Amino acid sequence: MEKLYGNDLAVMAYKARLLAVEAVHRAASGHPGGSLSCADALTTLYFNEMNVDPERPNWEDRDRFVLSKGHCAPALYAVLALRGYFPVEELQMLRSIKAHLSGHPDMKYVPGVDMSTGSLGQGLSAAVGMALSAKIQGKRYRTYAICGDGEIAEGQIWEALMSAAKWDLDNLCVFIDVNGLQIDGATKDVMPTEPLDKKLEAFNWHVIKIDGHDFAQILAALSEARRTKGKPSVILMSTVKGKGVSFMENQAGWHGKAPNADEFAIAKAELEAKIKELEEN
């Protein structure tokens, strides 16, 4: 596949947003807010950065990805479908007992999912294990993960961060989706974690801070992470929860709520208008 850049990446990300919101609407259940905030990073990983092959989802030398904030599966599923891992039409069966797309990523049934996640705080440990395995075996594949900024209040996250630094896992790159909101409200009110950059630097990680909706910055950060040797890299991406849907943006209430018919009609119109605007530029 030819890599996507700039406007083409943006178009694909908004298509993923539309598919994710539609899937959550059809299921009448799911997590749209955080799915929309991490869509740009996911799209960049699968359409530009990672060495993967949808026709060989279990290829031994593929790059690995772990969605540690597993409730944002709608965005991951949408990107995987657009990338060709399974038909886009199957997204209509999200959370259906008759289908394979559970509410959280399931590596047993969904092609392209490298780790089953959902219990917050555990995914990063799995990513550390994958990166360490590559080091031990002399493999060249890289491991990527996305964590939520609410999720990092979990103690296991910090144990994983310490382990990655101890083993000099420079083949590991982690995004933290800093959208400032979680299920109970603002992260600064629920459990303050700032200054994240200073804390992560103290844990001996290479820290990169970016606008998580700027594709040039995402690509530059990934390139910097690849060039960094001797320590793992973390990309702190500032994002907007609910990005792309006006009434969902920066609203904690849309963490885990499905839009009704009227709300979906508005969201669909806004996302389609953005896709058309991007395609015409």
Image: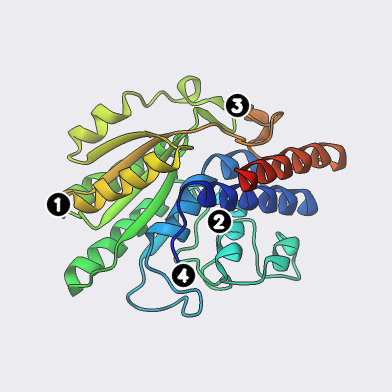
Q: Where is residue 107 in the image (x, y as percent from the top left)?
A: 51, 69
Alpha-carbon distance for marks 3 and 1? 36 Å
Rendered position, 164 above or below 3 = above
Q: Position of residue 38 (x, y in %)?
A: 51, 44
Counting residues from the N terminus, which is met first, the one under dot 3 or under dot 2?
Answer: 2
Residue at the image position 59 percent from the left and 33 percent from the top: 183
Q: Tell me which amino acid carries mark 1.
A: Lys
Alpha-carbon distance for marks 2 and 1? 28 Å
**Residue named by callout 2:** 76
Mark 3 lies on a secondary structure that is loop
The colour scheme of the drawn protein is rainbow
Mark 2 lies on a secondary structure that is helix
Tag shown at residue 229: 1
Q: Tell me which amino acid carries mark 3.
A: Asn
Residue at the image position 66 percent from the left and 46 percent from the top: 275
Q: Tell me which amino acid carries mark 2.
A: Leu
Depth order, front residue of 204/162: 204
Q: Which residue lies furthest to the right in this view?
A: 262
Mark 4 lies on a secondary structure that is loop
Alpha-carbon distance for marks 2 and 4? 19 Å
Image-based side of 23 in relation to 75, left or right = right
**Residue named by callout 4:** 1
Alpha-carbon distance for marks 3 and 2? 21 Å
Q: Where is residue 268 in the image (x, y as percent from the top left)?
A: 76, 43
Tag shown at residue 89: none
Q: Tell me which amino acid carries mark 4.
A: Met
Q: Cβ–Cβ below 8 Å for labels 3 and 4? A: no
Alpha-carbon distance for marks 1 and 4? 28 Å
Q: Cβ–Cβ below 8 Å for labels 3 and 2? A: no
Tag shown at residue 250: 3
